Image (spheres, rainbow, N blue to C red):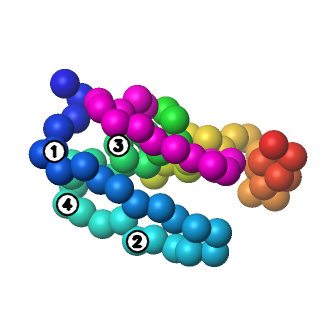
Amino acid sequence: MPYIQHENDITFSVNFGEKIHLSGTNGSGKSTLLKAIAGHLSPVHGNIHVRTGLCYLDQHFTLLDNTKSTLENLAFFAHI
């Protein structure tokens, strides 16, 4: 199994303008949670509801094109 199932459900919401700080030890599931919220992974059980567009930029910046400048990358994603 790719990640651990916990006994307790996780329920939270983030509204426009709010910021969250996600912290935990290495391997605790921070990136997995973010990937699931972004739709890159399916949850083991339960549901994830996202009611707006979002973009997941991983810690290795694989979403960005290394052959383009920062401004060119920003311009590309501003049109999506």
Question: Whole-percent x and y of residue 79?
Answer: 87, 46
Between marks 4 and 1, how big is the CA–CA gap?
16 Å
Quadrant for the C terminus in the image:
top right
> Which residue in the structure is indicated by mark 3?
32
Amino acid type shown at disc 3 = Thr
Instruction: Measure how far apart labels 1 and 3 are at the Cα level.
Output: 14 Å
| Mark 4, residue position | 25
Which numbered disc flags the more N-terminal residue, 4 or 1? 1
Position of the N terminus by quadrant:
top left
Q: Which residue is mark 1?
A: 6
Majority secondary structure of magenta residues: loop
Left or right: 16 in relation to 59: right
The residue tagged 2 is 21
**Magenta run includes residue 9:** no
Residue shown at 25%/49% (left/top)?
9
Q: Dividing the picture into quarters, in which one does residue 3 lie?
A: top left
Q: Is residue 31 visible?
A: yes
